[in-house]
Image (cartoon, helix red, strand yellow):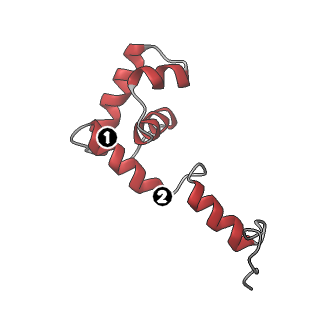
Amino acid sequence: MQLTPQLRKVADLIGDGLTNPEIEGRMGLRRETVKSYVKRALRRTGARNRTHLAILMRRMRGPREWDAAAVTRTLRASGKLLPPSGTTPVR
């Protein structure tokens, strides 16, 4: 699937559940531009609709940095996050 950086950003934001007005504000784009990008992203990905595109994008990227559980697992695995107080670290 070939998406330009702008189309990829719009598709990622759709995957995050943002609406067109929210995407407009986040990216500083005009309504018509966002609408056009959404249509192009749907066409290029072969998604049937906006919901399908959101599902495709979330599956493609895996966990994001804002995924608290994923961040916690990564930090614990790297030893940069201490276990909860009163527990013994597992090594």
In the figure, is residue 57 to the left or right of 79? left
In the figure, is residue 85 to the left or right of 31? right
Q: How many marks?
A: 2
Q: In the rendered image, which quarter is residue 37 located in? A: top left
Mark 1 / mark 2, whichever is N-terminal: 1
Q: In the rendered image, which quarter is residue 18 located in? A: top left
Mark 1 element type: helix
**In front here: 35 or 82?**
82
- Residue 44 bears which disc, if any? 1
Q: In the rendered image, which quarter is residue 2 located in? A: top left
Q: Residue 29 appears at what percent x and percent y?
A: 50, 18
Q: Residues within 10 Å of mark 1 (few under 14, many from 20)?
A: few
Q: Residue 91 appears at what percent x and percent y?
A: 74, 86
Up the image or down, 76 lies above or below 1; here it is: below
- Kindly identify the residue that appears in the image at 76 percent across and 81 percent down: 88
In the figure, is residue 79 to the left or right of 44? right
The kind of residue tagged 2 is Gly
Up the image or down, 61 lies above or below 4; here it is: below
- Kindly identify the residue that appears in the image at 40 percent across and 14 percent down: 31
- Kindly identify the residue that appears in the image at 23 percent across and 38 percent down: 49
The kind of residue tagged 1 is Arg
Q: Residues within 10 Å of mark 2 (few under 14, many from 20)?
A: few
- Residue 16 bears which disc, if any? none
The residue singled out by tag 2 in the image is 62
